[in-house]
Image: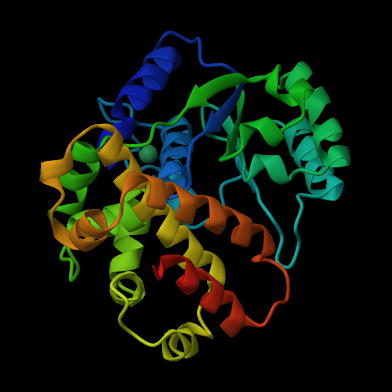
């Protein structure tokens, strides 16, 4: 497989550009994490290195280039990524890249470089890359990948051709997840993963969804005047506070959106209780107060007290 279904139009466009000899020497790919973007760049690099690509442009998997690439020993390929324990891509790594670009090409038709996460290049590293972007080496393509294109230096962005890798539509994500063997409901997985199918799949292998359902049960209990706030806070004390907050934001946003659309009758499923118990004004008020709490979530507060202050918002 060269590309996920939602990436196929981009794949075809790039393969056409290659066939027309118009593929830009520096491509800046941007898109959300969890949508298969790293896999896309790897498949694209392999296809451009391959000596005998398929009819759709994909790497053959058999030739000398494909085999050496699979063994991570391709002389015409270089990947620049974060080194272990480092928060940035360093200038030394880009110097090494510039040296690589000065060498002559080996047996593949092109040389390929992948830099990701590109926004993590520190200023010195980014400046050091500029020259290679301005004066491209022959038969060489530099592929940059980022989930945050706005964080790149404008001078880097302006020297690259931007390629947007899309988030799949809900239907595409469902269609991709359906054949997988899942233990949780697809819709809940996708909602928790904010529509990103690879994250949804990874979530399925964890207990996250059952934690999420339990949290919803506890919030509903508070809203109904049931449940003991002290006990519930103790239950969640060791849990990630930001995660608990984010789940509440997702639910409140869904409810607010549905109320705004006037789709009162169609709320079924897990949010049914919240929907019937909360008036729009109350929804907004909880939302605003949670936003206030979010500002405090990175402070080293007593976790139990923090969770209590969330739960109190839900109690009438
Ligand atoms: Zn090949």
13 to 144, vertically: above or below: above
307 to 171, vertically: above or below: below
Residue at 15%, 59% in the rendered image:
269
Q: Nearer the viewer, residue 48 or 185?
A: 185
Residue 194 placed where, x, y %? 37, 49
Residue 316 placed where, x, y %? 39, 67
Q: Quadrant of the N terminus?
A: top left
Residue 230 placed where, x, y %? 47, 89
As drawn, the residue found furthest toward the right would be 124
Identify the image's colour scheme: rainbow, by chain, secondary structure or one colour: rainbow
Residue at 57%, 53% in the rendered image:
291
Residue 61 visible in image: no
Left or right, 156 with reference to 316: right
Residue at 41%, 61% in the rendered image:
247
Residue 288 visible in image: yes
As drawn, the residue found furthest toward the front would be 316
Q: Nearer the viewer, residue 307 or 64?
A: 307
**The image quarter in which residue 214 lies:** bottom left
Q: Nearer the viewer, residue 124 or 43?
A: 124
Residue 208 placed where, x, y %? 36, 72
Figure quadrant, ligand 1: top left
167 to 92, vertically: above or below: above
Report how many numbered discs are placed on residues in the image. 0
Left or right, 132 with reference to 312: right
């Amino acid at each position: 497989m060269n590309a996920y279904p939602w990436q196929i139009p981009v794949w075809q466009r790039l393969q056409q550009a290659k066939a027309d000899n118009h593929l830009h020497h520096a491509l800046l790919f941007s898109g959300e994490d969890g949508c298969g973007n790293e896999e896309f760049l790897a498949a694209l690099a392999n296809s451009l290195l391959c000596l005998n690509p398929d009819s759709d442009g994909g790497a053959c998997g058999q030739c000398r280039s494909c085999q050496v690439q699979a063994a991570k020993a391709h002389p015409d390929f270089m990947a620049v990524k974060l080194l272990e324990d480092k928060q940035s891509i360093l200038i030394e790594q880009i110097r090494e890249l510039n040296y690589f670009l000065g060498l002559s090409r080996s047996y593949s038709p092109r040389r390929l470089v992948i830099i990701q996460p590109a926004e993590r290049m520190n200023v010195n590293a980014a400046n050091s890359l500029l020259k290679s972007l301005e004066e491209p080496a022959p038969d060489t393509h530099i592929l940059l990948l980022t989930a945050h294109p706005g964080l790149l230096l404008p001078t880097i962005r302006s020297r690259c051709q931007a390629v947007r890798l899309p988030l799949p539509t809900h239907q595409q994500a469902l269609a991709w997840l359906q054949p997988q063997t899942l233990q949780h409901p697809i819709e809940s997985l996708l909602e928790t993963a904010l529509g990103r199918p690879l994250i949804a799949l990874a979530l399925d292998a964890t207990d996250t969804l059952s934690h999420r359902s339990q949290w919803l049960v506890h919030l509903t209990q508070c809203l109904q005047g049931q449940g003991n706030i002290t006990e519930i806070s103790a239950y969640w004390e060791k849990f990630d506070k930001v995660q608990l907050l984010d789940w509440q934001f997702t639910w409140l946003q869904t409810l607010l959106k549905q109320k705004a659309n006037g789709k009162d009758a169609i709320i079924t499923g897990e949010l049914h209780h919240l929907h019937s118990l909360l008036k729009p004004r109350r929804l907004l008020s909880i939302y605003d107060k949670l936003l206030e709490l979010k500002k405090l979530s990175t402070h080293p507060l007593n976790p139990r007290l923090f969770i209590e202050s969330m739960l109190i918002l839900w109690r009438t």
